[in-house]
Image: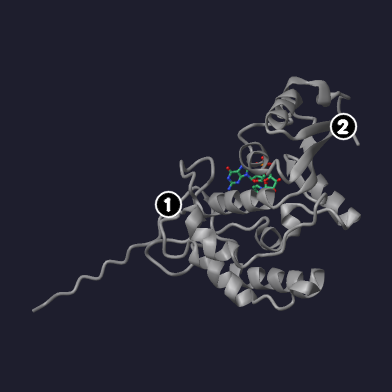
Amino acid sequence: AVVAVVRWRSPLEWNGEGTTKHFSEIFLGRCFVYTQIIRPELRNKDCTQIMAAFKGAFISKNPCSITKEDYQPLIQLDTKAVPCNKTLFWSKSKDLAHQYTWVHGNIFTLEDTLLGYIADDLTWCGDPSTSEVNEQSCPHWKKDNCPNNAASVFWKVVSQKFAEAACGVVQVMLNGSLSEPFYRNSTFGSVELLNLNPRKVHTLQAWVMHDIGGATSNSCSGSSLNELKLIAMSRNITFVCQDNY
Ligand code: NGD
């Protein structure tokens, strides 16, 4: 007799939270809100196609071996660039940066663009043994020694594209209540800053914000901002800094 042994391999276990519950519904909901209501000029975008391209990057794959190429089909579906002088980067100041762009209405962070808007605060990963998302656990970007996880690679790819497309004056909001408001290994320091195109971007304007009630400081004249200034200048980009705008 032939005995078939069916081995059911369960998804790998990781130290991070699993894929956000109702991921597909949230993804499609956000995509429709963005393309139908926030930017109706994008109303002809196909959200189902965008989600298929997004999932195609990581579904059924080892969640620690995701590559930038995996996200290329997705990137090619998002074509709308931010107008010149309207790009805002941030580092360790997400909430304030988003409150600012929300109130201002005509300045854009990555999360005010389609893919950033859809993915912000979501968690996702796949598993080689299934074509579903892994809702049990996903690699933790610090605890799992897994730098090429689905989310980190995604943010690297979209941050790079966002920076490459910037033009004119670009702005960055930094957190002056930290000892290193500019941190070279952050996404801003390691991806966005280095992918600004000096032929298109003439000035980098830094806004260094401090906690209200915290110690007053003038971070713009400190060593951390000086490091940023030197990198900008070496790339032929004029650097301007203001504390507590
Ligand atoms: O290595 C990581 C990592 N480091 C920080 N964070 C990380 N997530 C990973 N998967 N892997 C998380 O990203 C952290 O919890 C923050 O919520 C967020 C940004 O980290 P932060 O504050 O250190 O700032 P970064 O300079 O690294 O990145 C912010 C800039 C900003 O101009 C956006 O255009 O880079 C763009 N971005 C990068 C990563 C994530 C945005 C996001 C986002 N919306 O979650």
In the rendered view of the protein, which quadrant contains the C terminus? top right
Relative to 92, say whether 134 is above or below: below
In this rendering, would 6 be left or right of 65?
left
Front residue of 213 and 187:
187
Q: Position of residue 186 (x, y in %)?
A: 64, 37
Q: What residue is shown with label 1?
A: 65
Q: Is mark 2 within 8 Å of ligand 1?
A: no
Residue at the spot 74% in from the left edge and 35% down from the top edge: 237
Circle 2/circle 1 CB separation < 8 Å: no
In this rendering, would 230 be left or right of 134?
right
Name the amino acid type tagged 2: Gln
Q: What residue is shown with label 2?
A: 242
Q: Position of residue 25 (x, y in %)?
A: 63, 73
Query: Callout 1: 10 Å neighbours few (<14), some, many (20+)?
Result: some
Give whichever of discs 2 and 1 has the lower sequence position.
1
Q: Extreme front residue here? A: 199
